[in-house]
Image: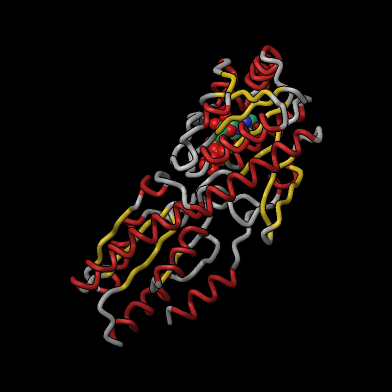
Amino acid sequence: MKRIGVLTSGGDAPGMNAAVRAVVRKGIYHDLEVFGIYNGFQGLMEGKIEKMELGSVGDMIQRGGTMLYSARCEEFKTDEGQNKGIEQLKKFEIDGLIVIGGDGSFQGAAKLTAKGFPCIGVPGTIDNDIPGTDYTIGFDTALNTIVEAIDKIRDTATSHERTYVIEVMGRDAGDLALWAGLANGAETVVIPEKDEPFENVVDRLKRGSERGKKHSIIILAEGVGNGMDYGKRIEESTRFETRVTVLGHIQRGGRPTASDRVLASRLAGKAVDLLLEGQGGLMVGIQNNELVHHDIIDILKQPHKLDMSLYQLMNELSI
Ligand code: ATP
């Protein structure tokens, strides 16, 4: 292994830059030449590839987004697209690739590995929806952004004695909603992993009001449905004045938290180690604070699991 490449793909996540930085610095430390591939798999097919130096990743660890840019690329899902990518890797004499992204990006990494080109996946997505790791890069930052936003919404919810429905991201996973629910002391969290009858949510709101609660906060994971529709149903069923906030893309941006920077550095460093050992077709993760690796194909077959004890605790605390 003499030359390695790194790309970011799928939705951007805070901490991706810290991961790219770690790949470049650790690679160079171990006498590798490191190439940055711009615009994800799209840029790989187009040969948007540049050699990175130590200074290429300077002043980057604290920045959100991704300096390598990201893209979604349908063509790469085809054999032809993957072969174009491999041609470029051969042209630049790159021997191994680190793919930072979500499960879609891992599919791409698995396909390249199956065609004889070793790839290591680094989980970078705010959704925390990748099996085989307790946390993904960006989750902690997005969670903190949500928590800060909801703290502010709570002030106005109290002042006006309103019910708020707050829609948060997470794709099909409820992690962001559930963790925010615990951290914000929300009354209710509605997540795709738990089919809670709508009447239960309404009953809980009514009970809270009878106890003299001045406001209520419902956190709705985007995977459950549209926040606006949900808010309308809540208002119709309770007759409480209800407002809806869809937090949207503010959740994806911003300076990564210390925790995400450290996680990104650790996971990316481990990915370089695996390439140096001549391995491929693996993803790196963190479980019980230990760095681990798993076969990417096995991981892609597994469903995402949410820690349901947190859901139970959330309900016990929001009684
Ligand atoms: P996020 O979780 O943030 O959305 P992601 O990595 O899951 O990130 P996707 O859009 O699903 O995002 O995938 C990113 C890219 O990975 C796709 O645009 C495509 O180029 C590549 N990709 C996805 N699925 C496959 C596949 N089955 N085969 C080859 N490449 C794929």
**Nearer the observer, 250 or 314:** 250
Count of marks overlaid on the render: 0
| Whole-percent x, y for residue 264 in the image | 58, 45
**Residue at the extreme left:** 160
Quadrant including the C terminus: bottom left
**Residue at the extreme right:** 278
| Whole-percent x, y for residue 317 in the image | 46, 79
- Residue at left offset 71%, top offset 22%: 3
Q: Is residue 111 above or below residue 304?
A: above
| Whole-percent x, y for residue 38 in the image | 53, 24
Q: Is residue 34 above or below residue 92?
A: below
Relative side of 122 to 164, left or right: right
Ligand 1: give its quadrant: top right
| Whole-percent x, y for residue 82 in the image | 66, 22
Q: Quadrant of residue 53?
A: top right
**Nearer the observer, 67 or 313:** 67
Relative side of 48 to 213, left or right: right
Quadrant including the N terminus: top right
Snapshot colouring:
secondary structure
Q: Quadrant of residue 122?
A: top right
Q: Is residue 315 above or below residue 286?
A: below
**Nearer the observer, 301 or 176:** 176
- Residue at left offset 44%, top offset 63%: 180
- Residue at left offset 48%, top offset 70%: 196
- Residue at left offset 68%, top offset 29%: 97
